[in-house]
Image (cartoon, rainbow, N blue to C red):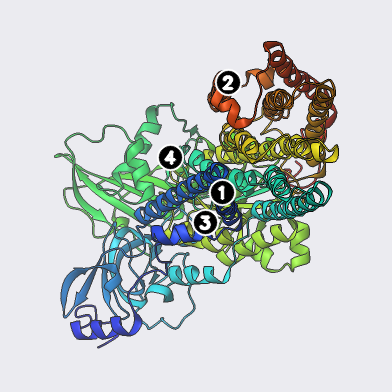
Amino acid sequence: MSAFAPRTGLTASEASERLAQDGPNELPRAGQRSILRIALEVLREPMLALLLAGGIAYLLLGDRIEALILLAFATFSVVVTVVQETRTEHVLEALRDLSAPRALVLRDGIRIRIAGREVVRGDLIVLEQGDRIAADAVLVAADDLQTDESLLTGESLPVGKIANAADTTAAPHRPGGEGQPFVYSGSLVARGSGIARVLATGPRSEIGKIGESLGTLETEAPRLRRETTRIVTWCAAGGAAVSVLVVLLFGLLRGGWIEAVLAGIAIGMSMLPEEFPVVLTVFLAMGAWRIGTVGVLTRRASAIETLGSATVLCTDKTGTLTENRMSVAELWLPTGEIFAVGPDTPFTGPFTDLIEIAALASAVEASDPMEIALHAARGPGMAGASLAYAYALRPELLAMSNVWDDGTALMIAAKGAPEAIAGLCQLTPDARIALTEAVEAMATRGIRVLAVATATAPDRAWAETQAGYDYALTGLVGLADPLRASVPGAVAECRSAGIRVVMITGDYAATARSIATQAGIAAGDVLTGTDLAALDDTALAERLKSVTVFARIMPEQKLRIVQAFKADGEIVAMTGDGVNDAPSLKAAHIGIAMGKRGTDVAREASAMVLLDDDFGSIVQSVRLGRRIYDNIRKAMAFIFAVHVPIAGLALLPLLFGMPILFGPIHIALLEMVIDPVCALVFEAERAEDDIMHRPPRDPAEALFSLPMVAWSVFQGGLAFAMLATVFLVESGSGMPEAEVRALVFFALIAEIVALILVNRSFSASLGEALLRHNAALRYVGVAIVGVTALILFLPPAQTLLKFGSIAWIDMVFAVALGLALLLLLEACKPFVRRGLVRTAPTPGRGLPAAG
């Protein structure tokens, strides 16, 4: 068939052959994971595998209590993670809406509507206002056709399309720009109609090529998991070595090999860091749930920690900072009067007439974003008037007019490009100069300008063309894509948190700088895509220090910018919603896609999805990410600290030739306190007061920093010193072994509670430690008191634990030891806090550009 025969289209048999040859018209997508597959992926995590292996090992050794505790927490972690990942899969599947829209095609000369996945190369697709274009195609007929290609270009305004008589399919072309004969998959028909011949489908389309390119990019491995795995390995190896040494020394020196094995098991249990994987798995799973409550879906839980340490936030403009819709921003009258439109500012006098005429010059049922904005701003309209005739926008005259009949006369309302309206109005040179100056002033503020004019027909018949009337200039209407209300506050909070916000957009430099200024993005240089292309990597790295706005940027350049920031050592977060954002979303440490307006390719490439498209949710996510990371560090510090006195008390009797103080049953009972504290209490801790007023942590800083480990060992060492003193003094004074064991055990419980309170906050306030709201701590506290009471009042429990009866004065003494430890450690906090957390921004990495 002829390449430009718009009346017949393919035959059914030709379509079937091409569908079999090229495959369905679908975007590349990863298969949806089943629950079993998700569970297997979770079980392959090395830390969780260690947790399960520890539980099974204790089960084989016959220690069912400890084994059940470990296996219960492992099961809980698996269930929470599987539920979260399954929820993510379902939500992402529900969000798919652009990969295969339905299409109206010509087959065998008949118009039929088919599924978008069945569109094939060579099909003739019929395009109508409001349609989502199903494939890349070239126009063979067009009537006032405009398409919204913002998902591919980042530019919010529709672009005009024309049909070419010559075969232009071999000519190079890209989305964006006026006057092209090409339309692209995923674009929206904003106005007009047309017929187009399909050139590319599925992965061969522009939208599909970007999706396929994502497969060449590797996502960042979670650093937190690597660090925790390393420390777990070290602690496990150290604990195993100490256990073997204890068994050998005990057996060789004392001769009781059975007792030696029990002592080795107790030492191993006291030093085994099973809480580390519990903390990481549960905290990140619960963190994903918490972030979900503020409208952010976490696709990779490890991204939470990375988001909390982000130093640079690269944000798109259209649909991210702005609302991706047009609104009236400014009005201008030929008298020179200007009206800046505000949210609660009513139009008056001639400004009302200007808006009214602009709306009357628009389509009655508007779909063009600018015309929708004009209708939204207009008054009640012309009562009793009806649309008699319409003059469409033409390439030779970029203006349109509507003829309205009120029963007595014909009124013509026109709008269009300022130069076109100026020609229709036959303006004088001075009037043209004034008009041009007003247009240029609006353009520098990022405002799209339409000129508006009106005329009255001399009789009841309308002219053949728009030029057949005597027009009078009514004024100019400036339209802008408004900034989201939450953006300035969110950007300000990012800057206070030491996060540098950078805009990357395909829009013009003047528009981008205007929006950046409104958003509060730090003043700096504007770098265009043309200038960026001329820079090598070294020169670009130097320019990054001063640039805050990148304008007229192509998709591959977004990727280069993100990679340049990463090469400079920054932790990069990237937001976006279009297919053009997908490569940079995947390349960034943390990609954040928009859920409502975003494409499925962008969502698949991202680590997080903003379900409500609210830029302000990013700041809440950063706050929660920092809180979660802080709480992980608090829990880890507590784990280090609490294992020192436990391990010390297990080793101390061996060194002094005394009977074993704690056996496996005692360690298991202590773990019933420690594990819930790690997994529940610290996870529920609220954010520090200065959490958004300190810089992000240095990307090279280890989770287990030397100051933190030293502080934890000091806490545990002080607790052990106090308990060891009590143990040695009371044993030397003749207190029975069973009573000494009970006294030291209850004193250890009190000291564990003190360690909990000390590590709840980085601050030095004792009131904060005692009074900070935490419901989980209350529940755990009640449980500790309850278990202590049961042991005190149930003789069978005392027999099982080999405890003797102790006097109330001894219990008061045990509690006093815990209180003394709390006071001593709180008094030390001011001297160690600077090493635990930075509280004041320092010049350098991650801070906003000067100016």
Q: Label 1 amino acid?
A: Gly
State the image coordinates of residue 411 (x, y, percent, origin top left): 25, 43
Which structural element holds mark 4? strand
Q: Residue furthest front?
A: 255
How far is the residue under mark 2 from the one under mark 4? 65 Å
- The image quadrant that residue 121 belongs to is bottom left
Which structural element holds mark 3? loop
From the viewer's side, name the closer residue of 356 and 365.
365
How far is the residue under mark 3 from the one under mark 4? 33 Å
Mark 1 Cα-neighbour bin, 10 Å: few <14, some 14–19, many ≥20: few
Q: Label 3 amino acid?
A: Ser
State the image coordinates of residue 85 (x, y, percent, origin top left): 45, 52
Q: Nearer the viewer, mark 2 or mark 1?
A: 1
How far is the residue under mark 2 from the one under mark 1? 28 Å
Q: Label 4 amino acid?
A: Val
Residue 785 image label: 2
Q: Earlier in the sequence, mark 2 or mark 3?
A: 3
Q: Which residue is mark 3?
A: 606
Q: Label 2 amino acid?
A: Val
Task: Report the residue at 27% width, 73% height from top.
Answer: 118
Q: Which residue is mark 1?
A: 62
The reply to whether residue 833 is in sight is yes
Task: Judge left or right: residue 698 versus residue 229.
Answer: right
State the image coordinates of residue 287 (x, y, percent, origin top left): 54, 41
Q: Which residue is mark 4?
A: 328
Where is the C terminus found, in terms of image quarters? Answer: top right
How far is the residue under mark 2 from the one under mark 3? 46 Å
Mark 3 Cα-neighbour bin, 10 Å: few <14, some 14–19, many ≥20: many
